[in-house]
Each structure stands twice: as C-alpha cells, then as structure tokens.
Amino acid sequence: MSVLVYTENWDGEFKKLSFELISFAVKLAEEMQTEVVALSVGKTKDEELKKLSQYGVKRILKVENEEVDQFDPQIYAKVLSEVAAREQASLVVMADNNTGKALAPRLSVRMKAALASGVSSMPDSLSPFVIKTRAFSGNAFAVTELPTEVKIVTIAQNSFDLVEKPSEAVIEDAGVDISGMKPKTVVKEVEKQTDQLLLTDAEIVVSGGRGMRSAENWAPIEELASLMNGATACSRPVSDEGWRPHEEHTGQTGKVISPNVYFAIGISGATQHLAGVSGSKYIIAINNDKEAPIFDAAQYGIVGDAAKILPKLVDALKKAKSA
Ligand SMILES: Cc1cc2nc3c(=O)[nH]c(=O)nc-3n(C[C@H](O)[C@H](O)[C@H](O)COP(=O)(O)OP(=O)(O)OC[C@H]3O[C@@H](n4cnc5c(N)ncnc54)[C@H](O)[C@@H]3O)c2cc1C
C-alpha cells in the first residue's frame, strides 16, 4: 500500500503547489501507516527532484520518455495508472488545477477509482474514507465518501501549509512502457501574448474594481504588482468597461485563481467575484466603504480612498526594497 503523488512541474521546475501536495500526502500517509511515493513526469533535473524530499518524501519516481515531453492527458493517465498499480497505491494525490482536472477523471475511469475533487482539509475518517470537497464555487463543502479500493483526490491550491521534513530520497526511473503512444494533439509552437506573469501562475495578484474609477488610474496597481513580482487582475465590470483586458477578470465568469496574496482594491466583494478568488490564502482589501462585503472575506483591510492609499503603499514598498 502507498500514497502516490503526481508532482507537476513547469518546464522542469516545481512550484509551491507540488510541495503542498507532498506535505498533505506525508501527513495523511502517517495516519494511514503507509509510505509516500512521488511521481515526476517530464524532464526534470535530479537536484530539482531532490527539493521534494525537503517535505518528507523518501522515494521519487521519474518518467522522462520523449512521449511525455508535452502534456497529453491520455498518455499521462496511462503512466499514472501503471505506476499506481505497480506501487499498490491506495490513494493518488494531484492538484485541482487544469492538469489535475484533465487527468483525474481519466485515471478514475482507468482504475475504477472514486474521485474527490477540490479537497481542502484532511479526511474526516479513513475507514470509510470520507473527505470534504469544495462545492458551489467554494461557498459550501460536500462531504464525500470514496468507497473504492483505490481513491483519487485533487487538492485545492493553498489549502495545506508546507511542512518541512528533510529526508534522504531515492530517485528511480519508473520504467513505464509507453513507447508507441502518440499524443492526440501536438503543440507545434507557443506564441505568448505577453511576457507578463500568467495570472493563474502568480503567487501575488493585485486586482482593481470599479472603485478605481477609470482606466487612467491603473498605474499604481501595475506598479504595486511589478514591485512584488505579481500579476494584475480586475473585477468583471472593469473589463466590461474596457478599462482592462478580459483575460484579467476573475470570478464566476472569469478566471478562478488561488494566489498566496490577493489585493482587492475598490472591489465590493460580490459573491460572483469571490467565486474566483476565495481560494486565495490571504485577501487584503482596500475600500472606502467599511461595510463592503469584501471585508468579510479579507484577512486584512484598509478603509479609505484607494487613490490616496495606493501611492503610499508603492512608496513604502520601494523604500523597503531599497533598504
Ligand atoms: C451571472 C453573473 C456573473 C458574474 N460574474 C462576475 C465575475 O466573474 N467577476 C466579477 O467581478 N463580477 C461578476 N459579476 C458581477 C458582480 O455581481 C458585481 O457586480 C461585480 O463584481 C462588482 O464589481 P466591483 O466590485 O468592481 O464594482 P462595485 O460593486 O461597483 O464596487 C466598487 C467598490 O469600490 C469601492 N470604492 C469606490 N470608490 C473607492 C475609492 N476611491 N477607494 C476605495 N474603494 C472605493 C466601493 O465602496 C465599492 O465597494 C457577475 C454578475 C452576474 C449576474
């Protein structure tokens, strides 16, 4: 028996999300009295793989065949199902992001395994295996029982703290035979629309709403984001007005993000907006109405005029960076 973690890498590098998955799996494996096996698919240097061992994983399997150079959910699902079967995994853990959403249902069918998507807390019980999943855009929890022998859970980003447990890990080739499997879709070339950090990848997001009053007032939002290596976002009315591009709009009808820090500036905090950002670890709100609903969702808040507060924040950050 084991807990298998699919540790996603981006161009050969792991992000905090992968370490969150390991931290969750290691804690759960202790309760299940079993071991964690991490699986890395795609080319990743061994020194990068070793970073996973900082969080307590002792065995790391890698698959670096050319068939997995590009993410193909069918090939990746085959790799995962083979490794899971060989490792006698009773639980497979992956992220609840675009990759996980493409992969987990395919793996569930292949392995006849029950799937819980969007997990943000430890299981309520191990036998039967009962776990809460996010429902209704994060406004409710669904208490879900997974009755199958093999179970799959996808983890909502920023739900679990990183727990460092440095250990010596063995790195092995997973030895999966996928020769002859061809990707169904081949990406020939990627043309980036912008060199800016992708909103969905950003750990810090600075977002403006209708309280910013016009497109001309966005300079301090952009400056704040750039000082913190973050991305900019906005509420839907802002993109509807054409003040910002539509790909920046977050919420029920826009992007769903879960950065470490989300600055909501001049945003009222409507449920449709929160549906896209409530997974953020910290929300910091700036609003001149102390009754604005965003303050109920935020951990930190400043009541006041954004036009006066933002330049002060930018100055303070510049000073802190040059100190
Ligand atoms: C089906 C449906 C789907 C939707 N999907 C989305 C979605 O995906 N994303 C989304 O964002 N919305 C969505 N909406 C719209 C949503 O209901 C709200 O209308 C919208 O989020 C409000 O945007 P806002 O907070 O920027 O503007 P407002 O509601 O106008 O709020 C502006 C805020 O700025 C504050 N403010 C004003 N001046 C200042 C100042 N000088 N300094 C500081 N604060 C100031 C005000 O107090 C207020 O709280 C959807 C609506 C529907 C019906």
Image (cartoon, helix red, strand yellow):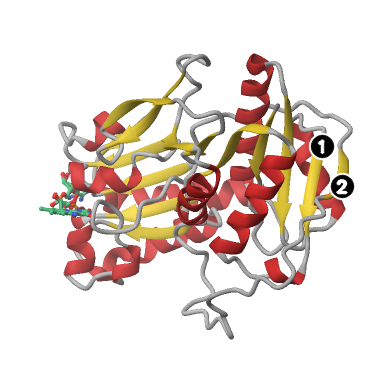
Q: Is residue 61 above or below residue 193?
A: above
- Taking the spot 17% from the left edge, 61% from the top edge, the residue there is 237
Instruction: Pick whichever, 230 or 9, lies toward us.
Output: 9
Q: In the figure, 19 relative to 15: above or below? A: above
Query: Which residue is disc 2 drawn over?
Result: 172
Of marks 2 and 1, which one's residue comes earlier in the chain?
1
**Residue positioned 85% across, 29% down in the render:** 167
Q: 116 or 177: nearer the eye? A: 177
- Provide residue 220's location: percent of width, then percent of height: 39, 60
Residue 206: x and y, percent? 40, 53
Q: Is mark 1 within 8 Å of ligand 1?
A: no
State if disc 1 and disc 2 touch (CB < 8 Å): yes
Q: Please state the horizontal and vertical placement of residue 27, each as a whole percent of the image.
A: 64, 22
What's the mark number on residue 263?
A: none
Q: Position of residue 71 (x, y in %)?
A: 60, 65
Q: CA distance from mark 2 to mark 1?
A: 8 Å
Per the image, the residue denoted by label 1 is 59
Under circle 2, the secondary element is strand
Q: How crowded is the residue under tag 1: few (<14 C-alpha within 10 Å), some, or many (20+)?
A: some
